[in-house]
Amino acid sequence: MPSDRHTRRRDIASRLNKMLSEYGLENAVSGGKFDDLRQTINSETGFWSHSSMNSKPSRLLVHLETTSNGVSAVIPEENSNGNFSYANTAHRSVGGLCVRIAPVIHLGYRRFEYFEEWEWLLWFIFPSALKNGSSGQVFDGLNPRTGEFNYLGEVQPYIEAGLVAIGEFDRPFTHDSATEKIEISYDQATAAIQELIQVNPVRQLSNEESEAANG
């Protein structure tokens, strides 16, 4: 696998695009042009500094926290409408979506830190091309426990999904102060996100089943 997360991200998106192109479809990647988020995440809330950024989020922000049971992951409470991605779906045959996940470490009361070295890709393959939306169409209503989300106001089915670890695997997050010491490994963070985000793909009908269903 390529040596850095930016190259790994592009490589995975390219592989998905190649696979989808065989069916006349293409893959959409959210937030591909934005890499340094330190100036856009509020260090007191661990969420976007400006509400406008949540209307078209370039990442799905996930809070990571050490607990007595290990490391836990949650979607920020501020993301009440479950916005988690956006993509250009206008005049395109979009059959797949890659969502970039960014970690924000909860250090304590109203103290958060974005850790730039880590990232994950959450990908979905749809049963057919999405209905055309806008050039910045939002995917929202994400329920990480059921795996459901909405597109154009309706629950969007998908037939495959997965989480790919593309961060700097050998770089743990460490925070050491006079009052506390926090250390989280990439493996621990990955396991926590896997536990948080469940997926529920629908079964794709075979040609025979599809013909029978259509009479």
Image: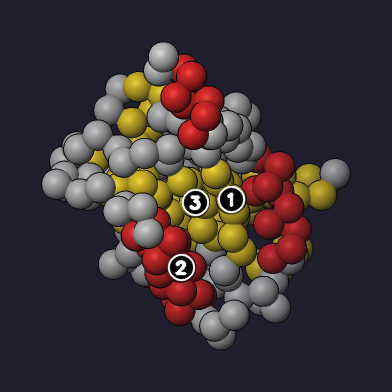
Q: Please report contact status of discs 3 and 1: CB closer than 8 Å, yes or no.
A: yes
Left or right, residue 82 beside residue 198:
left
* For marks 3 and 1 on the same chain, the one whose residue lies earlier in the sequence: 3
Spatial separation of the CA atoms under disc 3 and disc 2: 12 Å
Give the crowd class for mark 3: few <14, some 14-19, many >=20 residues within 10 Å: many
Q: Please report contact status of discs 1 and 2: CB closer than 8 Å, yes or no.
A: no
Question: Who is closer to the viewer here, 113 or 184?
Answer: 184
Disc on res. 162:
1
Left or right, residue 214 beside residue 118:
left
Circle 2 sits in a helix, a strand or a loop, which is it?
helix
Give the crowd class for mark 1: few <14, some 14-19, many >=20 residues within 10 Å: some
Q: Please report contact status of discs 3 and 2: CB closer than 8 Å, yes or no.
A: no
* For marks 1 and 2 on the same chain, the one whose residue lies earlier in the sequence: 2
Spatial separation of the CA atoms under disc 1 and disc 2: 14 Å
Q: Can you give x and y, in whole percent of width and height, for residue 167 in the image? A: 58, 70
Q: List the single residue furthest toward the bottom.
A: 3
Question: Who is closer to the viewer here, 69 or 92?
Answer: 92
Please report the residue visible at 58 percent of the width from the left and 50 percent of the height from the top.
162
Q: List the single residue furthest toward the top.
A: 215
Please report the residue visible at 52 percent of the width from the left and 29 percent of the height from the top.
208
Question: Who is closer to the viewer here, 124 or 191?
Answer: 124
Please name the residue that numbered disc 3 is placed on: 123
Please report the residue visible at 68 percent of the width from the left and 47 percent of the height from the top.
194
Q: Can you give x and y, in whole percent of width and height, for residue 195 in the image? A: 71, 42
